[in-house]
Image: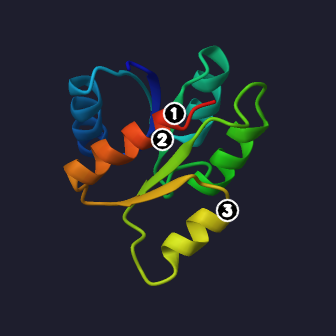
Amino acid sequence: MAALVLLVEDVEDNRALARFVLAAMGHEVVEAPCGVDALARAAERPPALVLMDLSLPQMDGYETAERLRALPGLAAVPILAVTAHAMAGDREKVLAAGFDGYLTKPLDLKAFRAAVSAALQRQP
């Protein structure tokens, strides 16, 4: 099932890898290098899934996710954290903040594909 995926990542190499994998899965990718751009892009074209880095310029991933959820029609859109924050307790913090999933960098491509597919299948 092809879907529109909003990829929020400030590092071009990370965006390129995720973009390549998502495109190979048949998804359309809209990219945002920061939270401000993510909000604008989501308002223009609501995505079926958001992949969000946590360390972003201007507005971190936590605040961006909170603001995305407040946009009309986006409250139930799954948001997966894709982050280098991989210390003890980081996963729990991310999930407690309302993210629907947690993936660490560097990406395990098999886990990445599985998480994307699972999140899209949970769509209402």
Q: Secondary structure at mark 2?
A: helix
Residue closest to the far bottom: 88
| Front residue of this view, candidates 1 and 43 | 1
Residue at 61% x, 21% y is: 46
For the C terminus, the image quarter is top right
Asked if the residue at tag 1 contacts the one at tag 2, i.e. Cβ–Cβ closer than 8 Å, the answer is yes
- Residue type (three-letter) at the residue carrying disc 2: Ala
Tell me the mark number nearer the camera, choosing from 2 and 1: 2
Q: Residue at x 57, y 32 (%)?
A: 123
Residue at the image position 60 percent from the left and 72 percent from the top: 93
Q: How many numbered badges does the structure rendering display?
A: 3
In percent of width and height, residue 91 lies at 50, 71
Q: Are marks 3 and 1 in contact (CB under 8 Å)?
A: no
Q: Considering depth in this image, is 44 or 37 the residue closer to the camera?
A: 44
Q: Which residue is mark 1?
A: 49
Q: What is the secondary structure assignment of the residue under circle 1?
A: strand
What kind of element bears circle 3? loop
In three-dimensional space, the C-alpha distance between marks 2 and 1, rounded to whole angstroms, equals 7 Å
Say which mark, if any, is on residue 119: 2
Q: Nearer the viewer, residue 60 or 47?
A: 47
| Closest to the observer, 20 or 10 | 20
Q: Pointer 3: residues within 10 angstroms few (<14), some, or many (20+)?
A: few
